[in-house]
Amino acid sequence: QVQLIESGGGLVQAGGSLRLSCAVSGLTFSDYAVGWFRQAPGKEREFVAGIARNGINISYGESLKGQFTISRDNAKNTVYLQMNSLKPEDTAVYYCATIYSTRWYEAKRSYDYWGQGTQVTVSS
């Protein structure tokens, strides 16, 4: 059974940082690219960052490069999202997702498996 479990969310003040983790089990992790998405209340789920299965090729959503950093540890079957300089508009539920591919895609319909999400709330 494939499981993706996000953790590390919480309440933080504007300007603060959080590090999200996505622990993956039930599949050969190194065969999958991974994406992070987020969904704010009343909005569509949007692409945040993606990392190829080699851990080298990376992409970020519009305006997020420089603020967020995605990485992966294939030995631990885990992907991370380091979020710095957080703003109230970063408040959302953050999801990780896997795709059986060498690289990520921004389209959420491309992904095979999803986690349940972790809430990030940034107060002003």
Image (cartoon, helix red, strand yellow):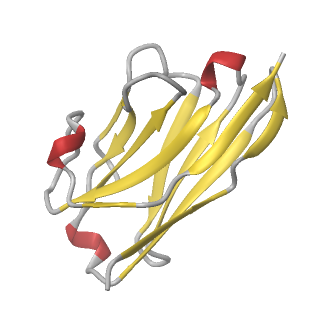
Which quadrant is the N terminus positioned in?
A: bottom left
Q: Position of residue 108 (x, y in %)?
A: 24, 40
**Image side of residue 119 versus residue 72, left or right:** right
Picture residue at 72% right of the left edge, 22% below the top: 85
Which quadrant is the C terminus positioned in?
A: top right
**Image side of residue 28 versus residue 96, left or right:** left
**Image side of residue 88 versus residue 110, left or right:** right
Front residue of 102/40: it is 40
User: In the figure, 23 relative to 40: above or below?
Assistant: below
User: In the figure, 14 relative to 23: above or below?
Assistant: above
Q: How many marks?
A: 0
User: In the figure, 106 relative to 72: above or below?
Assistant: above
Picture residue at 33% right of the left edge, 84% below the top: 26
Q: Determine the image quadrant of residue 55.
A: bottom left
Picture residue at 62% right of the left edge, 24% below the top: 90
Q: Determine the image quadrant of residue 41.
A: top right
Picture residue at 72% right of the left edge, 42% below the top: 18
**Image side of residue 100 versus residue 55, left or right:** left
Q: Position of residue 16 (x, y in %)?
A: 81, 29
Q: Position of residue 97 (x, y in %)?
A: 34, 55
Q: Determine the image quadrant of residue 106.
A: top left
Q: Position of residue 104 (x, y in %)?
A: 23, 45
